[in-house]
Amino acid sequence: MTGECIDILTELESWYARDSGQHLLRASETAVADILDTAFGYHLLQIGCTRGHPLFRSSPINHRIYVAERGGEGINLLAAADELPLESDSIDTVIAHHSLDFAANPHQVLREIQRVLTPQGQLLVIGINPYSLLGVNTVLRGLDRRSLWHWHSPVSQSRLTDWLHLLGCEVEHCTRVGSVPVAGGQTLRRWLGRADAWGNRHNLAVGGLYILHAIKHVPALRRPRRQWRLRRERLFGLLPRPAPAPSPTPFGQAGTGPGRNQHQRITRH
């Protein structure tokens, strides 16, 4: 599958080099920048099937790692997306650019991303929307088994949301770009560009690419009840206990006791 991934990498890079791909790339970078402005930390990671397309230029994080399976422009770590040579809970922000679209086991890739994310870490997943004109086009191109798009396995937004929920990540927002493909002559391209910009502003569900923003949540650890009881007992043992106060004698029983019996014996004599 490594050779196939390299071929897919080359195919995606050539696709992004065209005018329509460049238009989608700029729209994706703009949408990602709005989220990265509020994502702080020490380490940022971008993984995917393309090289030379960094989407983290606007990030305030200085240490940035660009991962791919083959060396190229801007790549500083060679690794597979499902086997990242990074420590657990070490990355503050992860950008997954088409990491799930062509993966043999996308769920494993997502588990690996969740592993390296720090608690409250930011995750941005960029994929092809199967319910769009771009998604239909890729499906039709993938009908040919000789085509590299045959290995494309789109992951829908709802399916991805369920996976993230199982992994302890909560989806914050989903942005879609590229609702109208830009093609044709200069005049037609200008009109289509305006229509696409309008669709991006209104976040239409038919956008060609979706950008899903999620946060890794770690539940607070609950200590056993017995530990809290023992801790409370230890705290009480450190404090001096007050002396017991004398209890008052109930009214009506003041004459009872050994003194009264002795007085009765003296009176009889």
Image (spheres, rainbow, N blue to C red):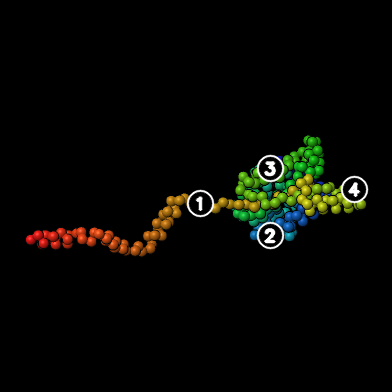
Distance Cα–Cα, label 2 vs label 3: 26 Å
**Residue 96, percent from left and from top:** 70, 50
All told, the count of numbered labels is 4
* Residue ID for mark 1: 222
Dot 4 or dot 1, earlier in sequence: 4
Amino acid of disc 3: Arg
Q: Callout 2: helix, strand or loop?
A: loop
**N-terminal label among 2 and 1:** 2
Horizontal side of residue 19 vs 105, given as left or right: right
Q: Residues within 10 Å of mark 1 (few under 14, many from 20)?
A: few
**Secondary-structure class at tag 3:** helix
Q: In the rendered structure, which disc, 2 or 3, sits on the residue that comes first in sequence?
A: 2
Q: What residue is at 78 percent from the left and 52 percent from the top?
A: 202
Q: Which residue is mark 3?
A: 159
Q: Quadrant of the N terminus?
A: top right
Q: Nearer the viewer, mark 4 or mark 1?
A: 1
